[in-house]
DNA sequence: CGCTGCCTTGAGTTACATCAAACGCGGTGG
DNA sequence: CCACCGCGTTTGATGTAACTCAAGGCAGCG
């Protein structure tokens, strides 16, 4: 099972903000975590952070390891999953720019990472080690609240995953994965959306075998609500697709 | 589908603490939420709270409703679930004394409840309305951190649910439900445990039909690692049961 | 032009849900 | 004490969604 991509698309370095010599953030960068802090707090946080580049397949944190790094995804995409007893991965969600991970480092409870995270694309992150995190906590009175917001949004997403993905038939799950992924990862406009996802990645995310995923996708292509190439899915109309798959016969 | 019990077992009023005239808590009461506060904060929180009795079948909060009540379960048991698209319930977990709910009321984001909670046993809770919650936030500087801990533990449990229940075969799920329920709800000693759960409740929690649940339970009874009566399961040895069901052939 | 992976297709198998029907425990009333 | 009834439980027969496995097709690349 592979979550990473072989190719390495658009690993780009965000443009530097002219007014600051602190670590660069891409223009238009949004983060639930940073949004909860004051401009001053953001500044001191960013100067304390160490930037890092990431590549596909790279394991960014592993469940069970001692939590000693708090980090923020700046560019790229990561897969968040959990290892099941039998060894294979239970996909939880995609991580996109602005998402923070390794919260255990700050919360201290649990002391170890609870999920495993793997890079899927080229990208970059900002990391705070244990010492920096501690400083961060002291310097940012709003950090507690900000973390609450982040935690709440994670909870929300997870509950949503449980309620929606987990106990619906395979076809609905796959449709859902496509729609949600489109919202998070889609490149172009609003309606026509291209997704750089292989059948296998989709299958993992929707919790089914590649075979089942292929069959459903093929069926949808025959219906004309979707086109696919190797490693790429194209939804001509996102809302159209959503409607067509939600309804009567999937 | 029924989560509530018909009988009304041990709805008991906790003994009052002699040193205080604030709302009573049972002896030996533990709560992640309260543990995160200072004694002074706890005191002011408890005096602001309104006690309430609850009965089986009572809906304590409903997903989608505006979040206007933060509450702490004092005695009894509740079922936390989510309504699926098709209308039936996706069981998330049991709520036991010490658990807090309606966090959205304090976090404000999301503004509505994300899960539905139903009482399963007679019991009691302490509730803070919107105004009291606001006061609580102002009076308790440690509340943010305390909520962090609560949220983190919820996340942890949810991830665990996803990883364990959702994608294991039915038998393993059922075994898991029994073990976890035993840990949370078991009455007597440490090894021998009695559970007041009907086959139907177990089936809901383990996400299967009553039929499948019955078959598995019957099989285990034949093996001697479990006894059952109407509406009651007895595990002669919890650890023995866990070992026997985790291993080779379930 | 052949190789390497991704993708597709079909046949066989399994786990679990669905449905119909009956059993039996535990309470209730005669 | 017995007959009755309701509801939780049990069993078997049957259907089916999705997984497994084997094999071949096809795109892109050297």
Image (cartoon, coloured by chain):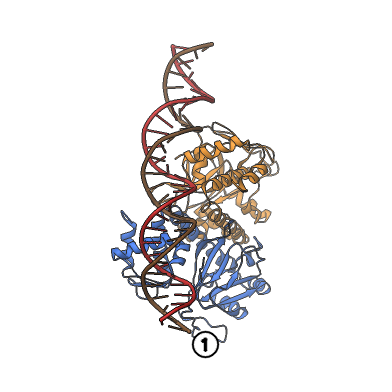
Chain colours: A blue, B orange, C red, D brown
Q: Residue furthest bottom?
A: A18
Quadrant assignment, res B144: bottom right
Mark 1 surroundings within 10 Å by alpha-carbon count, few (fewer than 14), some (14 through 19), many (20 or more): few
Residue A234, percent from left and from top: 35, 71
In the foreground, A130 or B13: A130
A192 to the left or right of C13: left
Quadrant assignment, res B156: bottom right
Residue A72, percent from left and from top: 56, 73
Instruction: Assign the C terminus of chain A to one quadrant of the image.
Output: bottom left
What residue lies at 53% left-to-right and 75% top-to-bottom? A56
Can residue B8 be seen from the camera position used here?
Answer: yes
Quadrant assignment, res B193: top right
**Chain to which mark 1 belongs:** A
Residue A190, percent from left and from top: 34, 72
What residue lies at 49% left-to-right and 59% top-to-bottom? A156
Position above or below: B176 against D2: below
Residue A183, percent from left and from top: 40, 68
Can residue B57 be seen from the camera position used here?
Answer: no
In the foreground, A199 or A185: A199
Q: Secondary structure at mark 1?
A: loop
What residue lies at 48% left-to-right and 55% top-to-bottom? A162
């Amino acid at each position: 099972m592979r979550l990473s991509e072989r190719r390495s698309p658009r690993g780009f370095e965000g443009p530097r903000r002219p007014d600051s010599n602190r670590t660069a953030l891409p223009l238009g960068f949004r983060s639930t975590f940073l949004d909860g802090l004051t401009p001053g707090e953001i500044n001191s946080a960013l100067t304390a952070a160490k930037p890092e580049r990431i590549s596909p397949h790279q394991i960014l944190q592993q469940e069970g390891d001692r939590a000693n790094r708090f980090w923020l995804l700046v560019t790229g995409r990561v897969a968040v999953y959990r290892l099941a007893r039998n060894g294979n991965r239970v996909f939880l969600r995609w991580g996109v720019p602005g998402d923070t991970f390794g919260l255990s480092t700050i919360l201290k409870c649990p002391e170890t990472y609870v999920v495993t995270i793997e890079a899927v694309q080229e990208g970059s992150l900002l990391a705070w080690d244990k010492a920096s995190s501690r400083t961060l906590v002291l310097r940012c009175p709003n950090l507690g609240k900000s973390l609450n917001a982040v935690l709440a949004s994670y909870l929300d997403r997870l509950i949503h995953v449980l309620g929606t993905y987990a106990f619906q038939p395979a076809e609905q799950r796959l449709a859902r994965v496509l729609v949600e992924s489109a919202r998070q990862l889609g490149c172009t406009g609003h309606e026509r959306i291209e997704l750089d996802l292989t059948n296998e990645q989709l299958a993992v995310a929707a919790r089914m075998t590649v075979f089942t995923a292929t069959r459903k996708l093929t069926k949808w292509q025959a219906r004309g609500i979707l086109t696919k190439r190797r490693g790429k899915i194209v939804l001509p109309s996102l809302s159209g697709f959503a409607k067509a798959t939600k309804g009567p016969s999937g």
